[in-house]
Image (cartoon, rainbow, N blue to C red):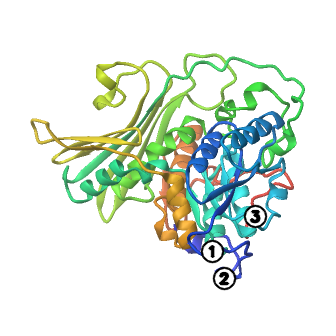
Amino acid sequence: MNRRHFLMSTAAAGSAVTARSLASPNDTIRIACVGIRGQGRSHISQYLKLPKVEIAALCDIDDSILNDRLEMVVKAGARKPAAYKDFRKLLEDKSIDAVSIATPNHWHTLQTIWACQAGKDVYVEKPCSHNIFESRQIVAAARKYNRIVQHGSQSRSGSALQEAVQKMKEGLIGDIYMTRGLCFKWRDTIKRTPEEPVPDGVDYDLWTGPAPKRPFTRNRFHYNWHWFWDYGNGDFGNQGIHEVDICRWGLGVKYPTRISAMGGHYMFDDDQETPNTMVVTYEFNGGGKRQLMVFETRHWITNNEAGIGAEKGRRGGNTVGNIFYGSKGYLAIDGYTKYWTYLGREQEPGPSAEGGGSHTGNFLEAVRTRNPAHLTADIEEGAISCTLMHLGNIAYRLGRTLTFDAASMKCVGDDEANRMFTRNYRKPFVVPEKV
């Protein structure tokens, strides 16, 4: 992402607001977990296992979730964290070094910008942005305030996937002409839920934040918010962003030249707005070399392509992974921790490996060293992958192929598509044009 595209002030990075400075790399990092129901609970579990880390605060708009997670930390033998409902109040605590954000998608960028402005380092879950404008602004804030910001692309910290990408760079499967990201997950109907009063203990105004204020329904709240455009980006932005990021990582590309998409909401009659079945195609043309990336999501019965998801001969179930096709063979990735290859016309088995890694551990290492180069998923990499996801969703919603110009960061001759790069923000929860 070119700096000239950042809508940011010209103040030097060194002018950033600073919080507590670690005296040495061995100091305990005080971290706050924000949005702690689903993936946020996993964040808490991971930080509890890591040395020299204190969960100093928890933040959630739902009292029942907040109280349960406070108890969880205490039961693990750690000191009881401070509790907050309003993220802005948490940021006033200068003793907190970093925040770990797992709120709904529509909050990720604004909360990260606020944290950077308050001098905090940030681990932000995928996707880091709800739209393309936010992809630019979140990187601008990280750079301006000189913050360590890690994107929740956990696969980039996995030893097996790092090896797979390196072997492809070395030419193991030859010239790669195509890659596919697969997101086939069993997802049942969400049915229809009526409008009802906001549950006790929930600050629904804070939950809504930058999004338009809608009447409360169960489907627009915990987890199912993923399937509404106001808050989520469908399964493309939920699970699929991992696969798009791995595709782009393996190809070694940034922005596409053309994007097309087709799909819909099939089989179920329910409240879901986003597609449950979709195919998105990207064409890259860097240095005269044309490559194709295809992302596919489907919600119901499927096959286990290239053996992905087929543990011990099992068929059906989830198929989540990637396939890279080259002139000398193909490479398949299963989830975040395994890859295997088949080489030559006879498809003889080639190199394979299995192994993960600690993404939160990698983040904390970079916080201690103050070196963003140590991050396996720096926010700029995450923002580029999110931009591809947003372009795919825009192509789907408009029903036409987009031609994208990376130099201007615009769709050529398509004002309607370019207007979908941002949204109308509900005051005072506005992502700023100058961070």
Specify few, some or many for label 3: CA neighbours under 10 Å numbering under 14, 14-19, or 20 or more.
some
State the image quarter where residue 66 is shown: top right
217 to the left or right of 222: right
Instruction: Say if mark 3 contacts mark 1, CB within 8 Å.
Output: no
**Residue furthest to the front:** 77
Which of labels 2 and 3 is toward the front?
A: 2
Percent across and percent down for residue 255 are 45, 58
User: Could you tell me which residue is drawn at 36 percent across and 51 percent down?
Assistant: 159
323 to the left or right of 70: left
Percent across and percent down for residue 275 are 57, 30
Q: Is residue 149 above or below residue 393?
A: below
Specify few, some or many for label 1: CA neighbours under 10 Å numbering under 14, 14-19, or 20 or more.
many
State the image quarter where residue 349 is shown: top left
Which of labels 3 and 1 is toward the front?
A: 1
Instruction: Say if mark 1 contacts mark 2, CB within 8 Å.
Output: yes
Q: Please report whichever mark, 3 or 1, sits nearer to the chain's N-terminal start.
A: 1
User: Could you tell me which residue is drawn at 50 percent across and 22 percent down?
Assistant: 186
The secondary structure type at the circle numbered 3 is loop
Which of these two is toward me, 432 or 315?
315
Query: Mark 1 sits on what residue?
Result: 146
From this viewpoint, is residue 126 visible?
no
Inspect the image, locate mark 1, and give the three-letter code of the amino acid beneath it: Asn
Q: Please report whichever mark, 2 or 3, sits nearer to the chain's N-terminal start.
A: 2
Which of these two is toward me, 228 or 36?
36
Query: Mark 3 sits on what residue?
Result: 432
Inspect the image, locate mark 3, and give the three-letter code of the amino acid beneath it: Pro
User: Could you tell me which residue is drawn at 67 percent across and 56 percent down?
Assistant: 54
Query: Mark 2 sits on what residue?
Result: 14
**How much space separates mark 1 and mark 2, taking CA atoms?**
7 Å
Q: Is residue 188 above or below residue 128?
A: above
Q: Please report whichever mark, 1 or 2, sits nearer to the chain's N-terminal start.
A: 2
